[in-house]
């Protein structure tokens, strides 16, 4: 353990910069996918992840779903609600607070697209 720390310590700045760059690139890729890929396909791919995956994978799927919803029109969102709502309600009851928060934000995004 100490040996590993001694090996990586001189490179800690570069390591963290690389991790941050990778994280930013992943966020950009998710944003582009949400914007340009068919919403129906994204929802169908993310649904089992939001339902079955553990934290942090489920939270990432919910966050990507939220971004996808933000690019949907009202009719598409209404059509996909039966696929999205049940898993979001289940996630709302998740033991991890950040997953619950992501589910609530996602539900709010649906409301903002669909309205009353």
Image: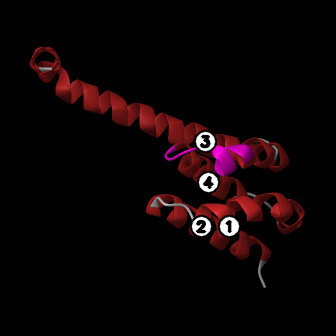
Q: Nearer the viewer, mark 2 or mark 3?
A: 2
Residues in magenta, as a range: 48-56
**Between disc 2 and disc 3, whose residue precedes?**
3
Residue at 82 percent of width and 57 percent of height: 83
Q: Nearer the viewer, mark 2 or mark 4?
A: 2
Q: SS at mark 2? A: helix
**Between disc 1 and disc 4, whose residue precedes?**
4
**Between disc 2 and disc 4, whose residue precedes?**
4
Q: CA distance from mark 2 to mark 3?
A: 22 Å
**The one of 100 and 74 positioned closer to us in this rendering:** 100
Image coordinates of residue 40 in percent, x first then y, are: 84, 48
Q: SS at mark 3? A: helix
Badge 2: residue crowd in 10 Å (few <14, some 14–19, many ≥20):
some
Q: Which residue is mark 1?
A: 89
Q: Which residue is mark 2?
A: 92
Tag 1 near tag 4, CB within 8 Å: no
Q: Which residue is mark 3?
A: 30
């Amino acid at each position: 353990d100490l040996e590993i720390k001694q090996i990586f310590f001189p490179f800690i700045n570069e390591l963290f910069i690389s991790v941050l760059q990778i994280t930013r690139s992943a966020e950009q890729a998710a944003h582009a996918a949400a914007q340009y890929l068919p919403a129906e396909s994204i929802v169908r791919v993310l649904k089992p992840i939001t339902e079955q995956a553990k934290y942090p994978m489920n939270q990432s799927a919910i966050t990507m779903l939220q971004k996808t919803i933000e690019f949907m029109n009202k009719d598409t969102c209404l059509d996909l609600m039966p696929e999205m709502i049940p898993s979001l309600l289940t996630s709302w009851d998740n033991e991890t607070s950040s997953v619950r928060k992501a589910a609530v934000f996602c539900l709010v995004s649906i409301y903002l697209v669909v309205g009353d």
